[in-house]
Amino acid sequence: MKEILSIAYAAVLIGMMFFAVHRLKMIYLYARHSRRRPPPPPLDPARAPKVCIQCPLYNEPLVVTQLLEKVTAIRWPAGKLEIQILDDSDDDTTASVADWLAARPDRAAAVRHIRRPDRGGYKAGALAHGMTLSDAEFFAIFDADFLPEPGFLETLMPRFADPKIAVVQARWDFANRHASLVTRFQGIFLDAHFVIEQEARHASGRFFNFNGTAGIWRRAALEDAGGWSADTVTEDLDLSYRAQLRGWKFVYLPDYAVASELPENMTAFKSQQRRWAKGAMQVARRQLRDVLAARLPLKVKTEAVSHLLVGLVHPVLLAFALLFVPYLVLRDEGVFTGFWNAFDPLTVLLLGCGTAVFYITAQYLRRREWREAALWFLTSPLMLAFGLALSVSCCFAVVEGLFLRGGEFVRTPKGGKRLHVGSVLGRLRARSIFAAITVVELLYGALMLWGMVHFLDEGDTGIAIVLAVKAAAFCGMALLTAKDLLARPRPVPQAAAAPAKA
């Protein structure tokens, strides 16, 4: 049994090392290939193509009016722009949209408020339905919490000069990143993706993905790749790989950002992360065979495999958390010697530092100044513990993605501190899933607390502090989720379905 434990622990650390090295590889690719690219010449307004802005909505009463204010202010030649509000809501979002449009007839002229009889296909179904109602050559997409500036199309559309360009993607930024410690950690994790990973893959000629919003698609590429599909809950990642396997090119603009909102509630955040983790594994099931069989450079294939299977880091991290305390206890009792003793906390520390460097480097690159990045490096143990605790929720999702096709597109509710997630959980009937996740988080927290007490008794204060931080992350995440689970659902007002505007 002891030999099995030591082998399992060593295997888990090797798995963690793979993911840590991959993150350092992303930094290397960024440093080697990323260059400031001069903007292309502006489009001649007389030759500007028709663009359709699509805004898929489902129950977003707290943010929909600010979205309407922003998208209707986007500049583009008269007669070449239409805006589709793809509204699948069954609450008062629909009435909010109708009231806003009625109060601003000057801005509403280019807007179509489109309602479907049902929510079939979820976001993918709404986008596909909107395409059938437009003859536009390009489609810009914004989720409800995004706030594009008036020059969005003027900045991105000139990048389509090459007819093989399928997508131009803007970077996400987060207007409420300083709202709480939870949003600060989210910002750090997501900045690593948008500042380093997306640019590293694009600049080095690897595949990267459209992020579902704050980007523009060429209609010809959408149709050639098979269009939007609800077979996965990350329709953006799925379509991105299908298009790139067909030879289409993607462009990423790291220096142009669109502001958005981070979930300020733990359950909303976990809901978002679960969908992304589940969807990535579903896309891996669908696309990996095609990626490996395609006539692509080896560097493209290997990075595509790493990209699509990144969700496997979550079961690896949970296995590490489960084995960490028993291994340390038995090691201190002299059970493990020689080779196995090499896999000690120093190795874990080095792996953690490598991961922290990845996230903190992204903070520096985002603003090109070290002060805030250095501050976050000092708090990186808590940040990494937060990421470890999040792996419980994401591990559930990875298992779902490995075995289940499609599924409900569970939107990430937005609205800052005004959001009442208890009602969302009740309506989505997700309480049992989050309750099970919370129990597992508490069990992991209890394991860390037991280890902390053990090592305090043994006089090993350093390891006890490490375990205390991990226990705080697991238990804190569980308690914040439990607060939502215990919230009393509020009744959701029903809005009458408004007919689509012709």
Image (spheres, rainbow, N blue to C red):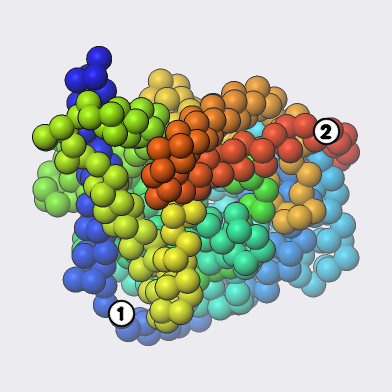
> Can residue 291 be seen from the camera position used here?
no
Residue 469 lies left or right of residue 311; in this view the side is right
Q: Indicate the position of residue 183 as horizontal and vertical percent values.
A: 60, 58
Out of 76 and 449, give the one closest to the viewer: 449
When the figure is inspected, residue 163 is found, relative to residue 248, above or below; the finding is below
**What's the residue at 19%, 20% (across, down)?**
3
**What's the residue at 35%, 68% (across, down)?**
361
Around disc 2, counting alpha carbons within 10 Å, would you say few (fewer than 14), some (14 to 19), or many (20 or more)? some
> Can residue 440 be seen from the camera position used here?
yes
Out of 213 and 138, give the one closest to the viewer: 213
Q: Indicate the position of residue 337 as horizontal and vertical percent values.
A: 15, 32
Identify residue for label 1. Answer: 37
Out of 472 and 125, give the one closest to the viewer: 472
Q: Nearer the viewer, mark 1 or mark 2?
A: 2
Alpha-carbon span between mark 1 and mark 2? 50 Å
Residue type indicated by callout 1: Arg
Around disc 1, counting alpha carbons within 10 Å, would you say few (fewer than 14), some (14 to 19), or many (20 or more)? few
Residue 56 lies left or right of residue 158; in this view the side is right
Quarter occupied by the N terminus: top left
Residue 317 lies left or right of residue 203; in this view the side is right
**What's the residue at 43%, 48% (across, down)?**
461
Q: Indicate the position of residue 99 as horizontal and vertical percent values.
A: 87, 57
Identify residue for label 2. Answer: 489
Q: Total label count?
A: 2
Residue type indicated by callout 2: Pro
Where is residue 446, by image quadrant? top right
Any mark on residue 382, and which?
none
Q: Secondary structure at mark 2?
A: loop
